[in-house]
Amino acid sequence: MDSASFLLSDTHRQFRDAVRQMAEERIAPHAAAVDRDEAFPWESYKALTEMELPALAFPVEYGGAGADMVTQAIAAEELARVCASTSVTFLVTKLGMLPVMNFGSEELKRTYLPRVASGQSQASYCLSEPDAGSDVAAMRCRAERDGDDYVLNGTKYWITNAGVSDTYTVFAKTDPGAGHRGISCFLVEKDWGVRVAKLEHKLGLRGSPTGEVVFEDVRVPASHRIGEEGQGFVIAMHTLDRSRPTIGAQAVGIAQGAIDYAVGYLKERRAFGKPIAELQGLRFMVADMAMRTEAARGLVYRACALVDAGDPDGDLSMVGAMAKCVASDTAMAVTTDAVQLLGGYGYTTDFPVERFLRDAKITQIYEGTNQVQRVVIAKSLLG
């Protein structure tokens, strides 16, 4: 996709069709059970790996497919259209590995990226803490140098894929008195003593584990520090700028799934002797849902194209924040309307729109709340 044209190529469209078919055949049938049982979607993850979707985000020289960001967004959208839990499983491993791709040593890249690209391993991103979510500089997790190692102590909260991931990208203070300039970044293997203290019971994304991850005297080789000491905050923000657009794509997928189901329902449901799809008030609701979703999709694709272009004008932070914010607000509005369109049926678990509504909410919260996105946008405009 060219950042000036915003037109999908034939390759993009063919890829979208292939992912959609796979998602409908192999992921959608498990979505309700995954949500009901709060179970990691292993069957769906198997389908992802067989289609080599985990490889999309990674360079060819490390076993990846080297796909552009728009292709990755299409995959995230099509997966979320049927199962948001599976979509975030696809996205979070890339999030965990972005610091390695962009700041890690050659040794780290060659050791870990091929394993993750193949689907053999999964990754988590450990930034938030109980008292340090949006305020990253308030983190308390410590990493103290001890010879050739760092000793890691602290707790990370709201960690996606907790317990399932093999590797954890962890941000910790190496200089507690230096504020955000004292944060460093490390790649930690699960078997080094990473402990999951609890898993959350959530409103949505119930098939994606979210938990409290504890580090107690975990020894991390200095070779597993990502970037330089004190570079962690820069790494974290650089990573989120390049990850947020695909969260926007996930939100667009959730919205599109709700629209598709509601449209089918309106065509079949009859009242007053005719399909309710003929009622003007409902037709206008669907039109508004479709307009908002298409506008959000365009903004998401633009943000993705900026990543692919290397952020030539320095607009990525602002446009990425806009894309994530607009798309997630759209997902909440559209899924709420989808429930309304189904009436009482929409409020029951027999129909998927209530799951879409519950899943949509988190897109307004994680990877920076929409209030934080507005801070980023205003700062870009006003200084």
Image (cartoon, rainbow, N blue to C red):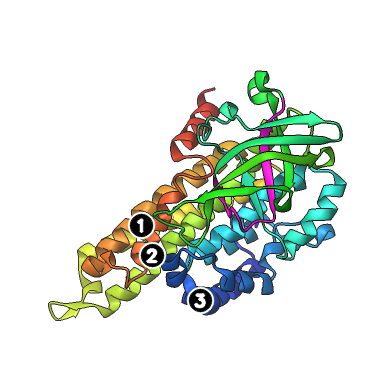
Instruction: Give the residue displayed 53% in from the left and 56% down from the top.
Output: 209
Front-lying residue, 123 or 97: 123
* Mark 1 Cα shell of 10 Å, populated few (<14), some (14-19), many (≥20): many
Disc 1, SS: helix
- Res. 48 image quadrant: bottom right
Q: Which residue is mark 3?
A: 24
Marks 1 and 2 sit apart, C-alpha to C-alpha, by: 7 Å
Disc 1 marks a residue whose amino acid type is Val
Q: Earlier in the sequence, mark 3 or mark 1?
A: 3
Relative to 235, say whether 45 is above or below. Answer: below
Quadrant, the C terminus: top right
Q: Is residue 317 left or right of residue 104?
A: left
Residue that carries the numbered disc 2 in the rendered image: 258
The spot of residue 231 in percent (x, y) is 73, 30
Which of marks 3 and 2 precedes in the sequence? 3
Q: CA distance from mark 3 to mark 1?
A: 21 Å
Characterize the local packing of mark 2: few (<14), some (14-19) or many (20 or more) Cα atoms within 10 angstroms: many
Q: Is residue 5 visible?
A: no
Asked if the residue under mark 2 is in contact with the one under mark 1, i.e. CB atoms within 8 Å, the reply is yes
Q: Point out the frontmost of discs 3 and 1.
A: 3
Residue at the outermost left position: 272
Labelled disc at residue 150: none
Identify the magenta region: 158-174
- Residue toward you, 244 or 154: 154
C-alpha separation, residue under disc 2 versus residue under disc 3: 14 Å
Location of residue 236 (image quadrant): top right
Question: Does the rendering let one see residue 132?
Answer: yes
Vertically, is 46 above or below 362? below
